[in-house]
Amino acid sequence: MFHLMFSLPWLIVATRFIAPLPWPLMVKVLLAAFLLVASQYHLFSRFTSGSVFAPEFPRPLVIGFNLFFGAIVLLAMMQVALDLVSLLIFAVKWSFPAVPAEVRYTMGIAAVLLASFGISQAIRVPPLKQIEVVIPGLAPEFDGYRMVQLTDMHISRLFTGGWAAAVVEKTNALDADLIVITGDLIDGSLDIRREDIAPLGGLTARDGVLTVPGNHEYFFDIDRWLGHFPEINMRILANEHAVIERGEGRLIVAGVTDLSARSTGALEPDLRAALRNAPADVPVILLDHQPRLAHRAAEQGVALQLSGHTHGGMIRGLDQIVARANNGFVSGFYQVGDMQLYVNNGTGLWPGFALRIGVPAELTEFTLRRG
């Protein structure tokens, strides 16, 4: 079913875009065949690694697959839009308009150019995004406290150890008080990704590195990954909290496991357990990979929740569909009761559809301010 769904854009392109072109039949067949191969990117990924989430091709080939698969999806969307316009004209004039070949050529070129731009934006080291956030009840000692959020790095054959090292260098240059990682660090098993993720062990901040698992960690032997992260200087908050102190002031950073744990038999997310024995009347910042249950965190007195997972929707317009699958949360700040929710666009992206158009990646620095 998964692969059939991802074949539908190719079917639209083959029947509605390629077939009407004024080209020799053999040329159209060859083009359709080439795009059919590109459309089966995820099927080939299963052959190389057993999972659609970890394409184990050389990086240039992963980029190429994303380029042409992305172009197919974009071109299918354009073709559907063109067909809808044709239907509207038919409803008025009772005849379908003739579509000049030049219109289709323009659509094809635009799809390839947009896909090229989209993948270039996806795979770059993200720009710095600086945000000030007011935390009610924040102790004076924490006014100006700086915290960097990394999320959805998806370290893989696309986001390699070299990319990770560049992210680490840019993050460390900020000289932050705390670094938090809100899940989906990897795509692949520990045996395959060990060297690529190694640069993250170089992340440094005065109060260390705190992380929670995302749903993708549960696709690749979650217990082994949770055992490995502390070996590279990350503290895992699996339904736990950390108390950070500055003089007489305190700040709580709590973290929960991912909702995917429910289908794997692993430790399910439990915010009450995460906050058990936490000091009273101290602001709580929650790390939760998925934003969809933010209302529950708000009910338990969390001041700020940091999430990822959505990748910001990746493409402007598609973000509204992604929002529907996440209780309306997709990118940026939301007020949920008395709690602020920030949904990060992501530092990286799932290598299965690595395009960003109008939704930039981000390396996010928060400066906390007193309310």
Image (tube, rainbow, N blue to C red):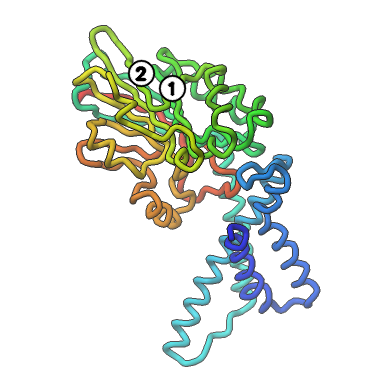
Q: Is residue 127 visible?
A: no
* Residue type marked 1: Leu
Mark drawn on residue 242: 2
* Residue type marked 2: Ala
Q: Give the residue drawn at x 56%, y 71%.
A: 79
Q: Is residue 229 left or right of residue 17?
A: left
Above or below residue 258? Residue 208 is above
Q: What residue sits right under mark 1 in the picture?
A: 210
Q: Can you give x and y, in whole percent of width and height, for residue 73 in the image?
A: 58, 60
User: Dot 1: few (<14), some (14–19), or many (≥20) neighbours within 10 Å?
Assistant: many
Q: Is residue 73 left or right of residue 191?
A: left
**What secondary structure is marked by label 2?**
strand
Above or below residue 353? Residue 87 is below
Screen quadrant of the N terminus: bottom right
Screen quadrant of the C terminus: top left
Where residue 129 sits, quadrant-wise, is top left
Q: Is residue 90 left or right of residue 333?
A: right
User: Dot 2: few (<14), some (14–19), or many (≥20) neighbours within 10 Å?
Assistant: some
Q: Give the residue drawn at x 38%, y 30%.
A: 287
Q: Give the residue drawn at x 60%, y 22%.
A: 199
Q: Can you give x and y, in whole percent of width and height, for residue 75 in the image?
A: 58, 64
Above or below residue 182? Residue 251 is above
Q: Residue furthest front?
A: 265
**What secondary structure is marked by label 1?**
strand
Q: Is residue 9 left or right of residue 248?
A: right
Q: Give the residue drawn at x 69%, y 42%.
A: 49
371 and 56: which is toward the camera: 56
